[in-house]
Image (cartoon, rainbow, N blue to C red):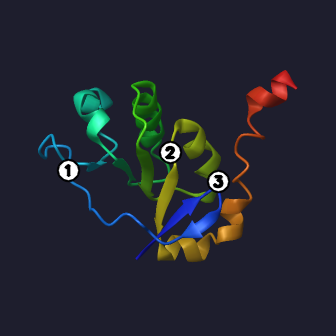
Amino acid sequence: MSVIVTDRGFAPDDWTAGFDGPESADEVTALEIGPETDPETLANRLPRLEMLRIRFESFADGRGFTIARALRRMGYAGRLRAAGHVLADQYAMARRSGFDEIEIDDALAARQPEDQWLARADWRAHDYQSRLRG
């Protein structure tokens, strides 16, 4: 099972349509991509995608944040999900990068309970740029 993390805390996964790989047909509505994916290869598909899930294979690999930011700059307006080993400490970075939610497994949710994620849910208020402007 997995847990979905949003600004409101933990929730069950409500996405039931499944995910296809980036090599699948152009008419799919949801893709799962890895950290090695070049966002430019998805450019012509973005308007049709309802959901993109980017896999994080390690908390130390930040390529997923870069991909998310690039996708948002390319105009992707659908649901963007980080999945895998993302830590509560990285939640604010994930949201600032453009992710709407994070999918973690039950084991990680047990090690880093909901209150640790909620402590970072006010991700807009604590960025360094607002402190510099302040």
User: From where the camera sits, is residue 37 visible?
Assistant: no
Label 1 residue SS:
loop
Mark 2 burial class by Cα count in 10 Å: few <14, some 14-19, many 20+:
many
Mark 1 burial class by Cα count in 10 Å: few <14, some 14-19, many 20+:
few
Q: Which residue is mark 2?
A: 99
Q: Which residue is mark 1?
A: 21
The location of residue 43, given as percent across then percent down, is: 27, 28
Asked whether the residues under the numbered discs 2 and 1 touch, taking CB atoms below 8 Å apart as contact, a structural biologist would say: no
Which amino acid type is shown beneath numbered disc 3?
Asp
User: From where the camera sits, is residue 36 visible?
Assistant: yes
At x 30%, y 34%, the residue is 46
Above or below, 83 against 25 in this view is below
For marks 2 and 1 on the same chain, the one whose residue lies earlier in the sequence? 1
Mark 2 and mark 1: span between their CA atoms? Answer: 19 Å
The location of residue 4, given as percent across then percent down, is: 50, 65
Q: Give the number of marks.
A: 3
Which amino acid type is shown beneath numbered disc 1?
Gly
Mark 3 vs mark 2: in front: 2
At x 83%, y 30%, the residue is 131
Label 2 residue SS:
loop
Which amino acid type is shown beneath numbered disc 2?
Phe
Looking at the rendered structure, which numbered label has been put on residue 89?
3
Identify which residue, 97 or 90, lies in the foreground: 97
At x 54%, y 70%, the residue is 11
Left or right: 131 as drawn, with respect to 14: right
The location of residue 66, given as percent across then percent down, is: 45, 33
Label 3 residue SS:
helix
For marks 3 and 2 on the same chain, the one whose residue lies earlier in the sequence? 3
Left or right: 125 as drawn, with respect to 12: right
At x 64%, y 56%, the residue is 7
Mark 3 burial class by Cα count in 10 Å: few <14, some 14-19, many 20+:
few
Mark 3 and mark 2: span between their CA atoms? Answer: 15 Å
